[in-house]
């Protein structure tokens, strides 16, 4: 139904910036309004944490820990989801995943969705922030 391919991760020093990209490839049956797509992150041994989500109407939701520093956006022409991360902190170090709902599910962007609401996941891209 959906393939998600992330890129843009890397290693930066505290205070630096990175821009993650997620190319979204949808099958012809993925035509319903699924509400939102978003980014999660996971540290080894911990649950995935919702980071930022964007609705089909452009509305956005952020985890409190990234508000004011991260910005989610999308380019519908290229089917690409972005996460601009500024003022990075060591605690932002994690594997970052792009996620999409099942083709006929509806996941609103707020309140902050949990990982159980999403069916399709990318392979992840590692972000490492050093102090």
Image (tube, rainbow, N blue to C red):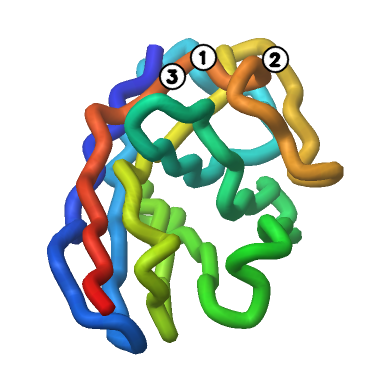
Q: Secondary structure at mark 3?
A: strand
Q: In the rendered structure, which disc, 2 or 1, sits on the residue that comes first in sequence? A: 2
Q: Is residue 24 left or right of residue 70?
A: left
Q: Is residue 4 left or right of residue 32?
A: left
Q: How far is mark 1 from mark 3, CA to CA?
A: 4 Å
Q: Residues within 10 Å of mark 2 (few under 14, many from 20)?
A: some
Residue 26 seen by the camera? no
Q: Secondary structure at mark 2?
A: loop
- When asked about the image quadrant of residue 17, the answer is bottom left
**Rendered position, 120 above or below 4:** above
- When asked about the image quadrant of residue 114, the answer is top right
**Rendered position, 20 above or below 131:** above
Q: Is residue 126 left or right of residue 33?
A: left
Q: Which residue is mark 2?
A: 105
Q: Which residue is mark 1?
A: 119
Q: Which one is nearer the viewer's eye here, 66 or 102?
A: 66
Q: How far is mark 2 from mark 1, CA to CA?
A: 9 Å
Q: Which one is nearer the viewer's eye here, 82 or 46?
A: 46
Q: Is residue 43 left or right of residue 53?
A: left
Q: Tell me the tag on residue 15.
A: none
Tag 1 and tag 3, C-beta contact below 8 Å: yes
Q: How far is mark 3 from mark 2, CA to CA?
A: 12 Å
| Residue occupying the point 41% across, 53% down | 81
Q: Locate the C terminus by quadrant.
A: bottom left
Q: Which one is nearer the viewer's eye here, 52 or 58?
A: 52
Q: Residues within 10 Å of mark 1 (few under 14, many from 20)?
A: few
Of tags 2 and 1, the one toward the viewer is 1
Q: Which residue is mark 3?
A: 120
Tag 2 and tag 1, C-beta contact below 8 Å: yes
């Amino acid at each position: 139904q959906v393939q998600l391919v992330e890129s843009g991760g890397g290693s930066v020093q505290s205070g630096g910036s990175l821009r993650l990209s997620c190319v979204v490839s949808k099958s012809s049956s993925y035509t319903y309004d699924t509400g939102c797509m978003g980014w999660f992150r996971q540290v080894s041994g911990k649950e995935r944490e919702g980071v930022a989500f964007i609705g089909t109407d452009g509305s956005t939701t952020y985890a409190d820990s990234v508000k004011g520093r991260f910005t989610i956006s999308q380019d519908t022409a290229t089917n690409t989801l972005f996460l601009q991360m500024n003022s990075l902190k060591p605690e932002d170090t994690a594997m970052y995943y792009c996620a999409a709902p099942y083709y006929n599910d509806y996941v609103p962007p707020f309140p902050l969705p949990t990982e159980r609401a999403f069916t399709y996941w990318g392979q992840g891209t590692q972000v490492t922030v050093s102090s």
